[in-house]
Amino acid sequence: MSYFEKFLEANMAYINLHGTSHLPLMPKTKVAIVTCMDSRLHVAQALGLDLGDAHILRNAGGRVTPDMIRSLTISQQLLGTREIVVLHHTDCGAQTFTNDAFKLQLKKDLAVDVSDYDFLPFENLEESVREDVDILKKSPLIPDDVLISGAIYDVDTGRMVEVK
């Protein structure tokens, strides 16, 4: 049995918990969270969020990319969010490689030239949060009145610490 088939079975059990109430399209807290795709982050549970409370946007490293800004712009301008939280985490895979080494690996393994591509690795966790918060604050697509915060989530303890 594939994992997809297991997911379909699990979904049948979830339907009973979900209920039939119609949640509004706009997130209840008016918050969008930018975070990593890491499977160890259960963002909603860690932050006390319920279904329908916030937009949770994920990618490798939780980095603010043009596509993340596209999603945040839609989240704000069409769906009413007024706050953004950048949430990176300890032991992140984006800290385990460099652009140059990864590009060489891709060229070798896939015969693909990605010399123009930035995979957004980072060394310093706190600095990566500050960089992404700064990108959001400087973006003309993110209004000045949007509250932007940054934090680090510890994958070993579940604790979140603000980055200033």
Image (tube, rainbow, N blue to C red):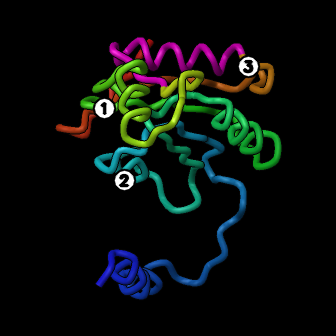
How would you rate the neighbour count of disc 2 (Cα within 10 Å): few for under 14, some for 14-19, many for 20 or more?
few
Specify the segment rendered in magenta: 120-138
Q: Badge 2 is on which residue? A: 45
Percent across and percent down for residue 163 are 41, 17
Amino acid type, mark 2: Gln
Residue at numbered disc 1: 92
What amino acid is found at the position of numbered circle 3 in the picture? Ser
Q: Is residue 24 left or right of residue 84?
A: right
> Earlier along the polypeptide chain: callout 3 or callout 1?
1
Residue 139 disc label: 3
Nearer the viewer's eye, disc 2 or disc 3?
A: 3
Examine the rendered structure and indicate whether residue 78 appears above or below residue 128.
Answer: below
As displayed, is residue 164 above or below residue 114?
Answer: above
Label 3 to label 1, Cα distance in Å?
25 Å
Question: Is tag 2's residue or tag 3's residue first in the polypeptide sequence?
Answer: 2
Residue at point 65%, 21% (across, down): 136
Q: Sort mark 3 into few (<14), some (14-19) or many (20+) by Cα contacts within 10 Å.
A: few
